[in-house]
Image: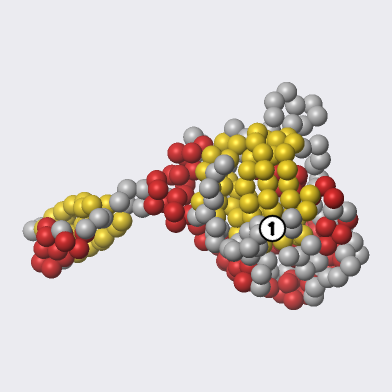
């Protein structure tokens, strides 16, 4: 069994063991023996190329798909034992926003509020995501980015304790992307837990406490972004400095760097232009583990 890096104490919120799934008309398993835990209060990233099974995992965990093999415990109970009350605890933001296009934003939210026993002040959320002034507009008049932001508001309207987010910032400009990421962080600070799938490695780096990489329907690596970078990166430091009329670059081993006399001499006697540790990126790790180049 894979040893997981844990940032939280206590029992996991979700415990998934040897999860397998095949679609009724499929000839091969989409999921092949996935095992992972999600701890209370963490943002857990599920990464992998398109078609690898990330959305299938989410659909199984939110009980949209049944007929899986293996074991899934939620709060130490078999997920199958939960009824409709389960949906009062979770919020879901699908990759493709689904709204009633002939209704206004406000009417859409009012409709979905009726499905839950308790809801939050969505006016406040609409203000946060910059849609309050457009609340009386029909969704058919919304841009893609506006629909994405409304989709995020809908995921939060029932005051969930667990968020399932699929590409939550895809298609947003940097400012609106920042707003949503801040809201995700605030949700976590208040004790919320998040399962995040995305192709945007910058979002993963910024938000996720741990990430699981999927390939061929299996999990091939689980750890924190920092630990993964240390594991797959080089322990070296590259120094760029002025030498005469040109620029010189030298690379040193990170271990015992403070005792490396050549490095110390350069720092003390040369004009330093840049110093970089040769830390790998999550995009490079993604390619290394899945063999797929990340776009976006």
Q: Is residue 208 left or right of residue 16?
A: left
Q: Is residue 149 left or right of residue 179?
A: right
Query: Would residue 266 be visible to someone looking at this image?
Result: no
Q: Is residue 118 left or right of residue 222?
A: right
Point out the residue furthest to the top here. 27
- On the image, the x and y values in percent for residue 239 come to 22, 57
Instruction: Name the residue rendered at 29%, 57% in the picture.
Output: 276
- On the image, the x and y values in percent for residue 256 come to 21, 58
- On the image, the x and y values in percent for residue 180 come to 63, 65
Q: Quadrant of the N terminus?
A: top right
Instruction: Name the residue rendered at 48%, 54% in the picture.
Output: 225
Residue, disc 1:
13
Instruction: Name the residue rendered at 83%, 62% in the picture.
Output: 88
Q: Secondary structure at mark 1?
A: loop
Relative depth, front residue between 279 and 34: 34
Relative depth, front residue between 235 and 25: 235
Query: Would residue 221 be visible to someone looking at this image?
Result: yes
- On the image, the x and y values in percent for residue 199 come to 57, 48
Relative depth, front residue between 264 and 129: 264
Count the labels in the image: 1
Number of residues whose C-alpha sits closer than 10 Å to that of mark 1, classed few (under 14), some (14–19) or many (20 or more): some
Relative depth, front residue between 46 and 12: 12
Instruction: Name the residue rendered at 74%, 58% in the picture.
Output: 75
């Amino acid at each position: 069994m894979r040893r997981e890096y844990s940032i939280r104490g206590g029992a996991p919120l979700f415990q998934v063991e040897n999860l397998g799934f095949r679609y009724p008309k499929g000839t091969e398993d989409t999921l092949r023996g996935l095992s992972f835990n999600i701890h209370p209060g963490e943002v857990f990233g599920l990464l992998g190329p398109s078609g690898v099974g990330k959305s299938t995992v989410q659909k199984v965990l939110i009980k949209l798909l049944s007929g899986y093999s293996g074991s899934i415990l939620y709060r130490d109970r078999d997920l199958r034992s939960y009824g409709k009350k389960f949906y009062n605890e979770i919020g879901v933001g699908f990759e493709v926003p689904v709204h009633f296009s002939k209704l206004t934003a406000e009417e859409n939210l009012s409709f979905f509020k009726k499905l839950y026993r308790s809801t939050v002040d969505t006016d406040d959320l609409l203000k946060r995501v910059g849609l309050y002034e457009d609340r009386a507009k029909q969704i058919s008049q919304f841009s893609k980015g506006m629909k994405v932001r409304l989709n995020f508001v809908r995921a939060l309207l029932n005051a969930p304790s667990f968020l399932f987010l699929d590409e939550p910032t895809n298609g947003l400009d940097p400012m609106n992307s920042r707003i949503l990421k801040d809201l995700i962080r605030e949700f976590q600070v208040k004790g919320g837990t998040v399962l995040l799938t995305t192709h945007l490695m910058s979002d993963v780096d910024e938000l996720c406490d741990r990430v699981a990489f999927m390939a061929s329907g299996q999990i091939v690596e689980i750890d924190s972004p920092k630990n993964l970078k240390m594991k797959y990166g080089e322990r070296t430091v590259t120094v760029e400095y002025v030498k005469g009329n040109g620029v010189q670059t030298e690379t040193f081993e990170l271990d015992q760097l403070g005792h490396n006399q050549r490095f110390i001499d350069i720092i003390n006697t040369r004009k330093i232009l840049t110093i970089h540790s040769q830390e790998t990126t999550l995009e490079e790790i993604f390619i290394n583990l899945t063999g797929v180049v990340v776009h976006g």
